[in-house]
Image: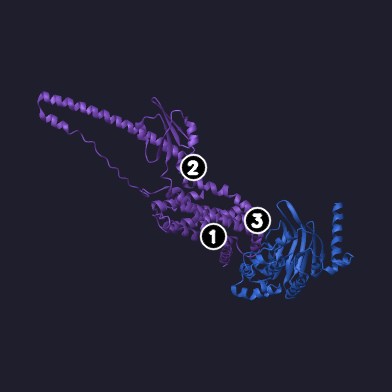
Amino acid sequence: MRTIAIFKRVLQEMFRDKRTLALMFVAPLLILTLIYFLFQSNNDQTAALGVQNVNSTLVKAIDNDHVTIHQLSDSASAKRVIRQKDYAGVLVQKGDKLTLTLQNSDQSKSAILKQSLQAAQVKLKTKAMATTLKAQGQALQKLQQALAAATRNPNLAQNQAGAPKVPNYKLKTHYLYGNADSTFFNTLLPIMMGFVVFFFVFLISGIALLKERTTGTLYRLLATPVKRSEIINGYLVGYGLFALIQTLLIVFYSIFVFKIQILGSIWNLLIINVLLAFVALTLGLFISTFAASEFQMVQFIPVVVIPQIFFSGIIPINQMAHWLQPIARIMPLYYGADAMSNVIQKGANFMNIGFDLTILVGFAVLFLMLNMVTMRRYRQV
Amino acid sequence: MSETIHVSNLQQGYGKTVVLRDINLSIQSGEILALIGPSGAGKTTLVSTIMGMLKPQQGQVTVLGQTMPNRQLLAKIGYMAQTDALYEALTGRENLNFFGAMQGLTPGQLKQQIPHAAGVVNLQQDLDTRVQAYSGGMKRRLSLAIALVSDPELLILDEPTVGIDPELRQQIWQELHQLATKGKTILLTTHVMEDAEQADQLMMIRNGAAIAQGTPKHLIAAFHVDSVEAVFLKAGRQQDENNRYI
């Protein structure tokens, strides 16, 4: 009964505050759309390469779609050219020696140049090998012909005419998850979905309870026979509902606008996000205890929220330094994002994400307990 | 008449600091008791302890025959906080509905009680305006209406008359006296002497100790002065002198 009254009040207050409502529902879509476009254009990057005195066959071998070649005069200094013309790199040949100078302000361009140069060298080597082989083959053939003429055995010559055929390999690639069009966005989306829900619920609910503390309504509320758990539950249901709507909005936006394929069930996504929202809510309420103003609440974002992004799977956890890896295990968003990725990209079912969900429930219960304890400060029964 | 509040040998504080000591207090039903004292004297701490928001460090507090703290008993206490603890985004009626529901009133009871409570503080016209548009006095009045809405046995009002104009103050006092004649008990804190003179019983608190206790008439006679204000000043001087000898 009291829980419902608190739930109703949370809704009333929220609907009166149109800007916060808009922030909660429009801002996530804006962020996701930006990320979508930012990580789409990643594939057709080209790097400018200046070449000086470089053998034309090598230059030809380097040339591909991702590299634009510019010929340089003999006198130009590599570093000055890079600074003046903003080339990604300059390749200089002196006799047998090749020197590659890279601008390296954009590491992905440096990678393109290094890769292209390596590929060119491999190409040239195989070509050279092929030429030698051909020459050897011809020599061999001549020798055999001479031999055949000498022994007058036409069969032998005929046999040798059909040289061993090089098998023509055709590569066909199958993708276990996603397809050839998969970009980093596909990896990022599940993580961002979880993060956006986590972040907004954390901030808005934390500030809401903070406001209750500073205006004295929380104390006034506790001067009634309400149970502490009823207050927390009312908040939980109220903000849980907003988190649910937010998740639905994001999921459908991703499906219809980004044409993202969600392999698993949408219900599982909703369960994960609602759980994640509960963790964010209980954490937000708890953290708000340590803030004296809205400004101080915002100061907790770099401490509590930002590190969670790093450990949410954007950077693969198993590529991190060993001592860093356990930190991910104490981040609620790590489990949320893991479950989200599994459902969206690998079609995981409820059983598969059971472990992550259990941990999230554990976090929610832990923060819930802490909230009950901190509320004791206001009323000791 | 039965005893509504009984406080014996109360010592109260936060952590190691002692805010109140040796407080003894008894209020009968139908009485109005005013706690007077300068700010920081410990009035609000005493009120919080009587409501059971704080556990007594020493001594005992009984309200309506039950030992405090007792969460269930809060349903029978109407409380008006010192700060206007209101939801600014909601209207006056929504605030009353919400806090009424928290006190345990049913929607039917609320429908009946809200017009009455709003009537006492002259807020009927503005019930459907959002609180953020209220003046300071209107917020104070809404806070009082919230305390009244559950028709409680015991009213605890922390500085109820701050920011309220004289006309309305008189009206509120009329209502309080009327409630008292119906058997309701009222405990209020104030530092306005006019309020103190209206009360049945006075308790003067200074530096965490009770310096004078009794009916206004009795106190004025006992201290050989002509007003409650003079009683307070004289009792304060006596406290300082006593402390000097210790």
Q: Which residue is mark 1?
A: A22
Secondary structure found at label 2: helix
What is the residue that sits farthest to the left in this orientation? A152
Q: Nearer the viewer, mark 2 or mark 3?
A: 2
Query: Do marks 1 and 2 both belong to one polypeptide chain?
Result: yes
Q: Is residue B239 above or below residue A182?
A: below
Q: Which residue is mark 2?
A: A325
- Please tell me how crowded label 2 is: few (under 14), some (14-19), or many (20+) other residues with Cα within 10 Å: some
First along the sequence among labels 3 and 1: 1
Q: Give the letter of the chain under mark 2.
A: A
Q: Looking at the colours in the rendered structure, which chain would you say is drawn in blue?
A: B
| The hue in which chain A appears in the rendered picture of the protein | purple
Whole-percent x and y of residue A42?
Answer: 43, 45
Whole-percent x and y of residue A122?
Answer: 34, 33
Can residue A290 be seen in the rendering of this structure? Answer: no
Dot 2 amino acid type: Gln
Q: Residue at x 70, y 73 (%)?
A: B122
Q: Based on the displayed image, in which of its 4 quarters is residue B66 positioned?
A: bottom right
Q: Based on the displayed image, in which of its 4 quarters is residue B182 positioned?
A: bottom right
Secondary structure found at label 3: loop
Q: Give the letter of the chain under mark 1.
A: A
Residue A377 numbered tag: 3
Q: Residue at x 56, y 49 (%)?
A: A304
First along the sequence among labels 2 and 3: 2
Can residue B115 be seen in the rendering of this structure? Answer: yes
Q: Is residue A253 above or below residue B30?
A: above
